[in-house]
Amino acid sequence: MTTTVPFFSTGDLSRELEAVGDVLHSGWLTTGSRAKLLEQRFAGACEADHALAVTSCTAALHLAVEALGLGPGDRVVVPSMTFGASAEVIRYVGATPVVVDVEPGTNLLSRRILERAVEDYGNIAACIVVHYGGQAPRMLGDEGLWDYCRERGIRLIEDAAHAFPSRSDAGPIGAVGDVACFSFYANKTMTTGEGGMLVTNDADLAARASIMRLHGIDRDVWDRFGAKSASWQYDIVAPGFKYNMPDVNAAIGVVQFGRAAGFRDDRQRVAEHYQRQLVDVAEVSLPLCDVPASWHAWHLFPIVLHQDAAVDRNGMIEALAERGVGTSVHYRPLHRMTYYRDTLNLDAQDFPNAEQTWQGCLSLPIYPSMTAEQVRHVTTSVRAVLGHSPPAHDG
Ligand SMILES: *Cc1c(COP(=O)(O)O)cnc(C)c1O
């Protein structure tokens, strides 16, 4: 029997299917009680005062930069090693991205890197930190990003698309910082199909984002149809967006939320198997976990193939595909994307750590339903492509 390992699989979703069925039978498909419930539970898990369910993490990031009042003339720091969404929202509001390199091994933005950007550019209005792969940088103390931002009056936005559930030295992601944005995209750590969550302790920011989430209307859909005054009685105070999460999606999210801690433990188990079964492969760098393993969301398991390996990264991806193993690349950095390179005059030489990752990186499959046999098939395949025998260790 041949083993195949897709890059991602949702696993069994029969409980989610049942929950969606209930929503469809209820007759209330758009934002309502399911979205409210997901928000309450999510805010609780993040130890934050406010959580707003939205249509994507990109929408949450957009609402965050808008509600913080960022606009033309404001410089916003963003790491190069990320998905385009982290940077495009800076442009949505007319502000200027300052694209920076990342720390080696973790691919994280850090206080050290932000300090250098402040030295180079002077005024920085905000920083979008990306919890690459599912771990956060240090937040508190002399090396802490949040403490530095607080001292300097730099607004800290967390792109936590990879990071639920996870924590930093300051507690659950979302507990500190100005605002944190999570993704429930299909292959993220929990899903609503498409969806996201904005989390904040800032009551003014939450109020603004809530209004802008739904057309700039001064009360949300739930109040509009659930509360005392008639549904036509609303005012529009700003040209808002259409970012509210429907209950059809939120119902999936409520079930996934309940499974999220178990999902995380399962992904950590896969990561630990990978580490044991690949640790002796000299041509490969394994992802550096700079926090206790239990703080890490383990959304990704990105390895970096060294320049002197028998195959290059693209060759490895093709060879693994031939063996039935799906992979991905996180990421081709922003400084190599035409729009950001050309409009911001970015030079690859200024991003040595992101370049080092980009040249050799590929992400191995990691998801809760992966079997020990599938993990072993992946490691055996990586090793075989590089001319190594199967892993000695079985665990
Ligand atoms: C997936 C992702 C996003 C966007 O999430 P959506 O919910 O698809 O909008 C943003 N940032 C990072 C780092 C991501 O991986």
Image: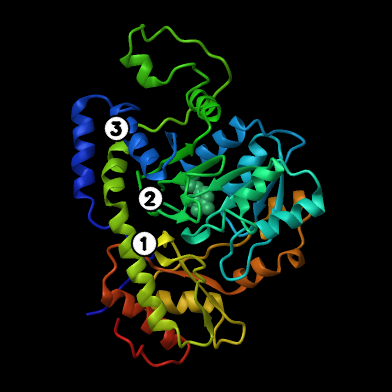
Percent x, y for residue 188? Answer: 40, 53
- Decide: marks 2, 1 in contact (CB < 8 A)? yes
Q: Which badge, 3 or 2, is on the more N-terminal residue?
A: 3
Percent x, y for residue 123? Answer: 78, 43
Helix, strand or loop at disc 2? loop
- Decide: marks 1, 3 in contact (CB < 8 A)? no
Percent x, y for residue 294? Answer: 39, 63
Q: Tell me the crowding category of disc 3: few under 14, some 14 to 19, or many 20 or more residues within 10 angstroms, Cα based.
A: many
Q: CA distance from mark 3 to mark 2?
A: 19 Å
Q: Closer to the observer: label 3 or label 2?
A: 3
Q: What is the number of the mark on residue 34? A: 3
Q: What is the number of the mark on residue 8? A: 1
Name the residue rendered at 46%, 92% in the picture: 387
Tell me the kind of residue under disc 1.
Answer: Phe
Name the residue rendered at 39%, 93% in the picture: 389
Q: Which badge, 1 or 3, is on the more N-terminal residue?
A: 1
